[in-house]
Image (cartoon, rainbow, N blue to C red):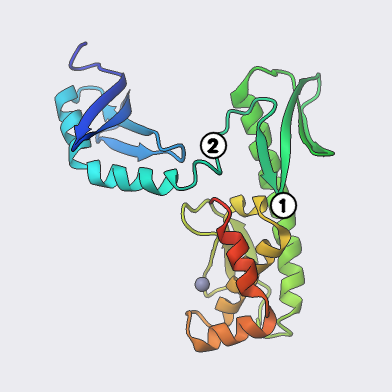
Amino acid sequence: MSILAGCGVHRVAFGKELIEFQLRRSDRKTLAITVASDASVTVTAPRRAALNAVVAKVRRRAVWIRRQQGYFQKFLPILPPRRYVSGETHRFLGRQYRLKVVESSEEEVKLKGRFLHVETRRKRDTARVRALVEGWFIKRASVAFERSLSSCLKQFNGHVATAPRLRLRRMRKRWGSCTQDGVIYLNPELVKTAGTCIDYVVTHELCHLVYPHHGREFYQLLQRIMPDWERRKTRLESVAL
Ligand SMILES: [Zn+2]
């Protein structure tokens, strides 16, 4: 193996364990380590970085890598990495759907009974199937979140002065957040949970537009607007992010 190339899978001993990582080379000037939601580790290194320097860096970041992996592994039994092939389960609005990929001259994604039905010109092109499915999820998330926002907002009887704007934002550890000028960010993954959980996150963020903290007044307002919020929160927390 050339010390300057070395792309592919490598292992670094860390205590009694081994950290496995995929090494990629790129034109970037610094080295980057990422841990994906399937707990796999990718190291992107400058083309000229020596392999032993890469390995040393991975070893120095081992505690962080393990922590990231531990975080994702908690959810792995619930959320296996998606392969975008027929038969796998995808969650939408709290229900499970089986993916069915069929070859067609048109490209379309729709729900058909308990199936998430994907028509594509390139059935075996899983990257294409993935793009179609993710695009569908994003569109449906926008629709579901807007609907939730307008119904939850009604419960506030003018407590929230200006109509908030909704944005989608992928967040690793949060379902939602907001800014004081009235932008609510929701994690598109939230569309996998039940509508009652979406309403809970939206209501939580709307309460923050009144009280930007988690103090007593915040919870009093939340309790008044959504008396069963704790039940919804528990249900939401049983879902993998
Ligand atoms: Zn909060």
The answer for how far apart the CA atoms under marks 1 and 2 are is: 18 Å
Residue drawn at 35 percent across, 34 percent down: 41
Determine which of the numbered discs, if any, sits on residue 93 in the image: 1
- Counting from the top left corner in percent of width and height, residue 28 is at 30, 31
Determine which of the numbered discs, if any, sits on residue 80 in the image: 2
Q: Tell me which amino acid carries mark 2.
A: Pro
Determine whether the beta carbon of the residue marked 2 sits less than 8 angstroms from the nearest atom of ligand 1: no
Q: Tell me which amino acid carries mark 1.
A: Leu
Q: Nearer the viewer, residue 40 or 166?
A: 40
Determine which of the numbered discs, if any, sits on residue 226 in the image: none
Left or right placement of residue 200 versus residue 217 in this view:
right
Above or below for 198 versus 124: below
Q: Nearer the viewer, residue 135 or 195?
A: 195
Q: Secondary structure at mark 1?
A: loop
- Counting from the top left corner in percent of width and height, residue 48 is at 20, 22
Residue drawn at 71 percent across, 67 percent down: 149
- Counting from the top left corner in percent of width and height, residue 131 is at 63, 32
Left or right placement of residue 4 versus residue 7 in this view:
left
